[in-house]
Image: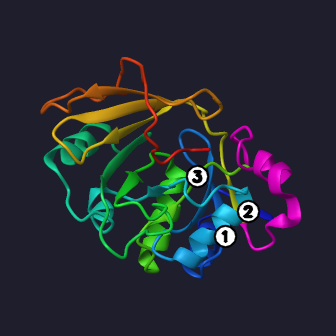
Amino acid sequence: MAIVGGNDSAALQRAAAELAAGELVAFPTETVYGLGARADDDAAVAKIFAAKGRPADHPLIVHVGDAEGARAFASEWPATARRLADAFWPGPLTVIVPRRSGMGTAAAAGQTSIGLRCPSHPVARELLAAAAALGVAGVAGPSANRFGRISPTTAAHVHEEFGDALTSSTAASARPASNRPSSTAAAARPRCCVRACSPASRSRPRWASRCARPGATRRAPRARWRPTTRRAPSCG
């Protein structure tokens, strides 16, 4: 697995070309490193599940460059989703919306909803833009580690985790990801659920109800914790 510099635009263009060709690319986000494949290609997404050893019924987060890119995967874009995106994107918030038929089927594990995120990390954003220019609608990207293990925060961690097992993969190296918590919001209904997710945590997911309000300040969503059995796209 090759490691390229995140400040090397030519190398990121090559990484984007690998994504367009259906290969895997590890890239930094503002939380942890993700293992990415083009989300509009189910065969490419299957490589993520195989590499991680992740059950295929566990949906993945799809990374997009902006709200317009998110709409390519959504059958509808509710007002709640728009307000959440306006308030917290780019950033570590995953918005769950109804999925457009035929888009991101494997990434969504066949579910009728899909989790979409617009990262703020500059390397992730440049990679997404370069991939979009090559026709990649979005990049499915769970954390770049084997299923159930600690999420990586450097390109070196990704290499240690997979080594040469991912011979076609590229790790875009940049400043370490922050390992900061991320949140998930289900925006398909007037009320939505918000989950704060610590990437390195192995604790059971906990949810809370919250409404997105017009004019909300740009800060991480806070939640009152309640247990749930609902499965949502995760970073694991």
Question: To which residue does mark 1 refer?
Answer: 47
Label at residue 154: none
Q: Residue at x 62, y 44 (%)?
A: 236
Check the picture and name the quadrant holding the N terminus: bottom right
Question: To which residue does mark 3 refer?
Answer: 142
Q: Is 189 contained in the magenta span? A: no
Q: What range is drawn magenta here?
A: 146-169
Q: Residue at x 75, y 74 (%)?
A: 168
Q: Earlier in the sequence, mark 3 or mark 1?
A: 1
Asked if the residues shown at circle 1 and circle 2 are in contact, with their CB atoms under 8 angstroms apart, the answer is: yes
Q: Position of residue 30 (x, y in %)?
A: 53, 40
**Left or right position of 215 against 25:** left
Crowding near the residue tagged with mark 3, few <14, some 14–19, many ≥20 C-alpha atoms within 10 Å? many
Q: Is residue 32 visible?
A: yes
Q: Position of residue 222 (x, y in %)?
A: 36, 21
Q: Residue at x 14, y 30 (%)?
A: 215
Q: Secondary structure at mark 2?
A: helix
Q: Is residue 4 visible?
A: no
Relative to residue 229, is residue 114 depicted above or below?
below
Question: To which residue does mark 2 refer?
Answer: 51
